[in-house]
Image (cartoon, helix red, strand yellow):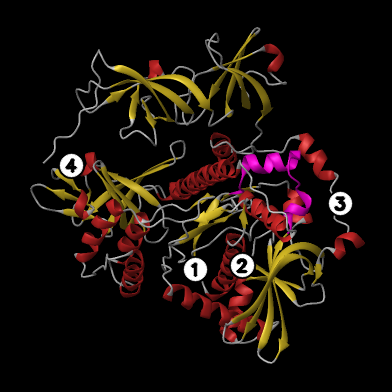
Amino acid sequence: MKKKKSTKVSPNAQIRLIKGRLDISRSGMGFVIAEDFQKDILVKPNDFGKAMHGDVVRVQVAKGGAINRRVEGKVVDVVERKQTRFSGDIHISRDIAFFQPSGDKPVPDFFIPADQLNGAENGDRVIVRLVRWDASDRKPIGRVESVISAKDEADMAMKELLIENGFALEFDDVVIQEMKQLDDRISQEELKRRKDFRKVLTFTIDPVDAKDFDDALSIREIAKDVFEIGVHIADVSHFVKPETLLDQEAYQRATSVYLPDRVNPMLPEKISNELCSLRPHEDKFTFSCVFEIERNGKIRNQWIGRTLIHSDHRFTYEDVQNTIETKSGKYLDEILLLNELAQHYRKQRFENGAINFSSTEVRFQLDADGKPIGIIVKESKEAHKLIEEFMLLANRTVAEFIAKINVNDKPLPFPYRIHDTPDDEKLKPFVAFARKFGYSFDMHNEKEVAASFNKLLKEVSGKPEQHVLEQLGIRTMAKAIYTSENIGHYGLGFEHYCHFTSPIRRYPDVMVHRILQDCLDGHPKAEKKLEQWCKHCSERERAAMETERAGNKYKQVEFMKQYVGEEFDGIISGVSSFGFWVETVEHKCEGLVSLRDINVYDDFFHDESDYALVGAFTKKKFRMGDKIRIQVMSANLVKRQLDYAWVAEGIGPIGTKKIKRNK
């Protein structure tokens, strides 16, 4: 067995610079995570220099002369700021003003010059933009952008989550002024550039509370058992032109953020909910994929281009689901045919290697003030799958079209949506764990792994181990990203795939529309910055997901505050060396049972191979997926944290005093 290389440096070691992202823990210790360096680099608080959490930095480490595993470094340069806007409190004393940022990561106080207060008064909650932090500055220099007005604590929390993750709350006045100049009138010249579908039956299918409708379906029979089906997408690129202020703002945001009580849009509301939204009974500019499809699902022909549509009806998913189930309702024949075709394409996808993962999603019922009063588990029914399959078909069709185009004998750079094969290091322990339940995996190649996943997901349905195996299976998967280096989409089983169907809420779709039009015009051009743009969009997508996850967690805590002291059935949803997480069966709200509380009962250790905590003396096991009884001990909104206690049969909550709820 080879000895592990030691990585602590000796006094005689040479100096080298490593580029990576600085991650500062709540305790204040920092780690630089670099792609081209095997170990995370420890950075102590005094060595942060001018860097803050999330910044891309260059860190100085000693090269060679390793003595032990730890590598320590010192930040010498900030390459890129993760965040330039911060929320917090302003403190003014005479002519001196300081800004204290909020959040769970350590951030230094800012100095605010008197002429940069922008009307803020002592004690105000404000948004401050970082102006500079040069070598000669003891503290960061900032300026107040605005005073945050919030109707309550929850409203303030949602706004601060957005700011902390780099999303602006408002659009600058200059962006709004530029938007007001947009013209949605249909000129004769524009009409000549487009196919006119306004007389073809067209409708949208969206959630009941949707305000922006960026996709529509049209359908008409063109021969016996042959149908023309159009997937029509809002033509955002008609209004948002490259290098405009609107485009720059959309690129910086890169995505809309969907919080439980609001949407923080990528584009101003007039564009997302009015100009581009495919509202019923209005003529709209669209970009479309139109297919000639036989009743058996065979695609005879396809066309891609700019169009003009007129939506005849706005369906909700519930409307369409009711039509499918009752065989009655508006446009019955068309809905049933589209559903039949969607089911055919779905079946075909799984036969070709797509993986049939499904995860439980919850939606909060909110009162008029945004307070959570209930939780609804969202089900993916046939109506949802109908839309999903036609959107997948359009996305794949556009990617396949572009993949055939070369520029200077090289494939045209294009923002593909790719999904890599599972990581062996994550897959192997999962396969071993699934084997304990009697499920086998064929590991010979990626297609067999996908087939094994689908077999497992089908066989596990309705069984006690379903939840744990589905969740662990999802965790083995790589994250989907945007890149010009196409390797296909493993989870969907597609060789070519992109995002074309949601340009109102995703910037990569806008890029796809522009490149696609260049190709249709016969003038494809290779954009040198495309990979940089793809990376930015992937990063903003992750930031949006983190914001949404934190927003949902906040609402969970807010909802569960009323149940402190009460007991519920739950499922262990995760295990670590310091405790385990439990998701309540009734509410799908996750909280932590701390190991320090159950250790009074036994000496538990973490068995990583079995995803379990095991008692050294009693052999009592808490394993991911196990059913358990818990008591809600506390609900901390500031930390967005629920604390649960394990309720042992006949004993009560272990390691805590039982709380009686005041009725």
Three-letter code for the amino acid on which mark 4 is drawn: Asn
| Residue on which disc 2 sits | 394
Instruction: Give the camera-side residue of 569 and 284.
Output: 284
Counting labels gives: 4
Vertical placement of residue 101 versus 388, above or below: above
Q: CA distance from mark 4 to mark 3?
A: 67 Å
| Residue on which disc 4 sits | 599
Three-letter code for the amino acid on which mark 2 is drawn: Ala
Badge 4 vs badge 1, beta-carbon distance below 8 Å = no
Three-letter code for the amino acid on which mark 1 is drawn: Glu
Instruction: Give the camera-side residue of 323 and 513.
Output: 513
| Residue on which disc 3 sits | 183
Q: Label 1's element?
A: loop
Residue 379 disc label:
1
Question: Quick one: label 3 or label 2, which is nearer the N terminus?
Answer: 3
Vertical placement of residue 119 versus 580, above or below: above
Q: CA distance from mark 2 to mark 1?
A: 24 Å
| Residue 485 point in image, percent of width and height | 50, 51
Badge 3 vs badge 2, beta-carbon distance below 8 Å = no
367 on left or right of 171: left
Q: CA distance from mark 3 to mark 1?
A: 39 Å
